[in-house]
Amino acid sequence: MELPAIPNRIETITAFKQNSGMIAAVLPIHYPRSLFRAFDVLPVEVWGPPGTDVSHGGAHLQPYVCSIVHNALSFLKKGGLDLADFIAVPHTCDSLQGFGSILLDFVKPKQSIFPLYLPRGNRPEDLRFLTEEFRQLYRHLSGLTGKKPSEEILLRCIRREEKADDLLRQLYEKRQKVSLSNYSFYHLVRTREYLPAETFISIAEKVLSRKGFDNPKGTAIILSGIVPEPMEVLTTITELGAAVVADDLACCGRRLYASGKSEQPFRRMAERILNAPPDPTRGNSLEERKQYLLRLADQTDARGVVFYDVKFCEPELFDLPRLRAKLKAAGLPSVQIEIDLNDPLSNQIVTRIGAFLEILG
Amino acid sequence: MEEVKALGIDVGSTTVKLTAVDAQGKLIWHHLEGADPRVEDQVDHFFNLMREHGFDGKELPMVATGYGRNLVEQAEKKVTEITCHATGVYNQLGHGGTLVDIGGQDSKVIIIGENSQVVDFAMNDKCAAGTGRFLENTAGRLRVPLDRMGVEALSAAEEVAISSTCTVFAESEIISMIAHGVEVNPILKGLHRSLILRIVAMIRSVGLVPPLMLSGGVVKNPAIREMITQELGEQVTMPEYPQLMGAYGAALIALKNSNRA
Ligand code: SF4
């Protein structure tokens, strides 16, 4: 079944700006969407993008920095982010932390840069820290836009994002029944990277209201890692006879934020991020990640995990050998694939996934 | 010749292999030649060859493997080289363990279980490091025939360290050594060591499960066998036709599928 019409990034940005909104280019992974929206700023995420000529930013970065950061810097330097009014850089990993510093100290783009510090845990002090960090971001945005959205507006924006995230969760839960291919499902889910919540809500509601759902065919697998690029890999997985029934991807499943509880807006935004599924960039332990993946496999009858990681991604690759060993000991096999955002899908990758599916039988 | 019951074709990056098996899965005929980029034409030529040898390949069940497997239209099924090598070697040697296959442009380590199933595997990255191409390139530079490389390397009492596992960088390293008057055979020995260390790292990434088995065209080189034994402290075993194991495994899978049908 086809997806309803979905505007692309450029169409979305143009339409938003025409209504006198502003744009924040946001680097991966976690940040408070609702806080930006309360200032009439649309966050548009920058996961690379793939296939960028990296020569523009190469001089500032070591060769062992991941291609998400290499591409983002080159994209920025050749004007790819010119439509953005601000750039937000969460301190997700050393590479992005370095990226933020390079922008502030050397590249100095015309846009204001917001670094965003994320705690590495989920203790009461982490919640206090992140709440205060969001207050600080509010003051920063207020200074730049001259706006001072009230608590009521903030809460309204939070609830709208919560509704969008709840529909996202429903799409995930019903994905085995939603008759969308692997590719179409992720095309839809990844629009959360740039669509305003209200647009996403109307598209998701249309898809969820469809009747006559089919069950997926093929070997059920979980996709873990950062980002499913090139997206063609999802079609290849279908052709190889498998269905992605759940994911632990940084751009998708690790951001299935549950609704917050607090009526205090900054605290509620912080709760949502801190209670998201386990993520090595937020300091979750191997045991938490293992339990989460085993639970996902149990709930979806997934037979194995494909770890689809960006080469040189330190938070991911640091955990991977031990995580895979733990999963193997618990009876959940896995395979590791490393990609560079600028490479086409190689024959080796297809063979690795194919061989893994043959092992799963 | 016994009656051919199934075929396997391995379309590799440097060579294409075709094998034929009888009803018991015995390898009764094979053909190997350099890879042609026009895979379909090469497969047609293989069918002509089979006719010349008295059997019609088009009538037989066939499984294709190797990087060009999807281009073999005549094959009823495409199976990865990982599964095919494991099947072929298990049937030849009669046991599981760790199989190291070193081919022209890729190498792989496959842990084979007690029932011939693949338990885990690792493959080299997309560059030529850790593959036959690494030796081939540098052999050209040293003007040593490929089939003499291993013997020459083993004859050297000294060994120079080649720090680069990258084929291109290793070549520049060699050029500079030659310019400094270093002898050819110690360089050759160092080159083999560099390749073996890369393979050993791959074996360690999946965990060695003895016995250690070797396949692929490159393992005909005696220095590879000897150095792998030195590095891992494990004796190695090899099938009779190490280069044909992918195609043989493919033929066995085709035979099994046709018996099931
Ligand atoms: S891919 Fe990994 S290293 Fe690169 S930005 Fe993302 S988390 Fe950081």
Image (tube, rainbow, N blue to C red):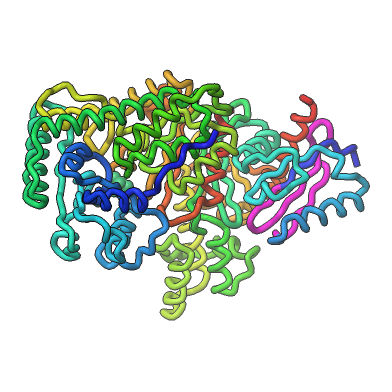
Rendered view: B104 above or below A168 = below
Residue A264 picture location, percent across and down: 9, 27
Choose top left, top right, bottom left or bottom right for residue A79. Answer: bottom left
Based on the picture, tell me whether residue A294 belongs to the magenta stretch: no
Residue B44 picture location, percent across and down: 81, 54
**Between A72 and B61, the one nearer to me in the picture:** A72
Q: Quadrant of the N terminus of chain A?
A: top right
Q: Residue at x 18, y 59 (%)?
A: A111
Based on the picture, tell me whether residue B31 belongs to the magenta stretch: yes
Q: Quadrant of the C terminus of chain A?
A: top right
**Between B14 and A253, the one nearer to me in the picture:** A253
Q: Which residues are magenta?
A: B10-35
**Between A230 and B182, the one nearer to me in the picture:** A230
Residue B72 picture location, percent across and down: 73, 48
Residue A168 picture location, percent across and down: 36, 29
**Between B223 and A98, the one nearer to me in the picture:** A98
